Amino acid sequence: MARSVSPSANTTSVSSASRDVKSVSETALAQATVSAALPPCEELVRQYLLWLKMHNGSPVTLAAWQLHLRRFHRWCGERGIESLEAMTPDVLAAYRRWLYHYRNARTGAPLKFSTQATYLMPLCRYFAWLAEAGYLPENRAAGLELPKQEKRLPAAVLSAEEVERLLGATDIRRPLGLRDRALLETLYATAVRAAELCQLQVYDLEPDRCIVAVRQGKGNKDRVVPLGRRAWSWVDRYLREVRPGLIAQSTTTALFVTAAGRPFGRTHLSALVRGYLRKAGIDKPGSCHLLRHSAATLMLTAGADLRSLQLYLGHARLNTTQLYTHVSIQRLCE
């Protein structure tokens, strides 16, 4: 005999099912609302970079960090990790392992530990900002340890004789050769970084005192460095005889300009210096930074004190400058 179902029991069952459906719908709606309220990852990166800019982050840092953050998001996208919620501490740890095991497709060389740290540092700051801004409940990169950076000596240093060979490799009979001589003399005399030389303006020179104002250098810091009378004599010739012709169709105030009258870029500058190293028969790795290392080492060998050298090079910490004491001792032993 078929069992009868009371109308009250049936009503209760329908009511319970309706509540379950309503609960699921509300949960799905809440999740959709949260997901819709959260900007896409690309927009979050843009907001973070804007925040850095508002806090006086340098343009060089902003450009580099944008590249590193986009690399991470591209890596996530290739693995189906699209949402910010899915970027867990385990995902960050997996990304660090991927950087460690990465090999250059052409040479098979791994990434240096310093390069791995350079890629990971922006992620640590980015996820800390996401937590502070309320996009995440916690900083998911808090437990991410950066690789211990190696303290290595410069790969190569030029001797005083090699520096003179390099400077003499320019053809000063040609306008661009005269410009290049002034440029190389400035690089060596001031020991500025490549990016700092590209940013030098004509009004940064003080001819009476033979000094150069380096503005917004690394870390957005200004400093003043001596140019030296020999270097100034070449720069003065370049300013009088060459630069006016190069900027005939330009309004730039950059100190050193290309044949097209535009400011130098770092890549162009490095290629120029590397070409003169080859022309001088100097088979040592490096370009602009090689001259910076060489100037610092020769100054220390000649008796400059570390504190003066720190100010000269624009180092934030003295222990960075102490690197050159090891180079100097090595040269003394040789």
Image (spheres, helix red, strand yellow):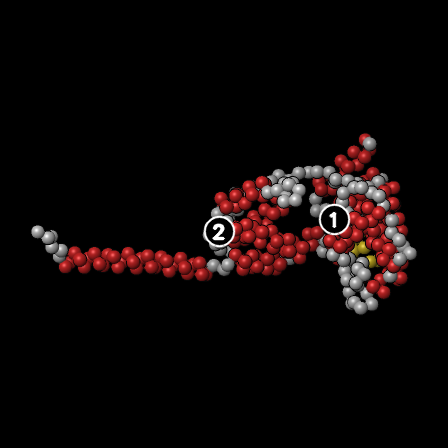
The residue at which mark 1 appears reads as: 314
On residue 80, the disc is 2
The residue located at (33%, 59%) in the rendering is 25
Question: Would residue 37 be found to the left or right of residue 226 on screen?
Answer: left
Question: Would residue 203 be found to the left or right of residue 42 on screen?
Answer: right
Question: Would residue 4 be found to the left or right of residue 318 on screen?
Answer: left
Classify mark 2: helix, strand or loop.
loop
The residue located at (74%, 40%) in the rendering is 154
x and y percentages locating residue 328 in the rendered image? 79, 36
Q: Quadrant of residue 302?
A: top right
Name the foreground residue: 105 vs 228.
105
Q: Give, as a three-letter code, the residue at label 1.
A: Gly
The residue located at (61%, 55%) in the rendering is 66
Classify mark 1: helix, strand or loop.
loop
x and y percentages locating residue 184 in the rendered image? 83, 51
Name the foreground residue: 225 vs 35.
35
Q: Nearer the viewer, mark 2 or mark 1?
A: 2
Mark yes or no: residue 113 visible: no
Q: Residue furthest front?
A: 106
Count of numbered badges drawn on the protein:
2
Q: Give, as a three-letter code, the residue at label 2.
A: Gly
Q: Residue furthest left?
A: 1
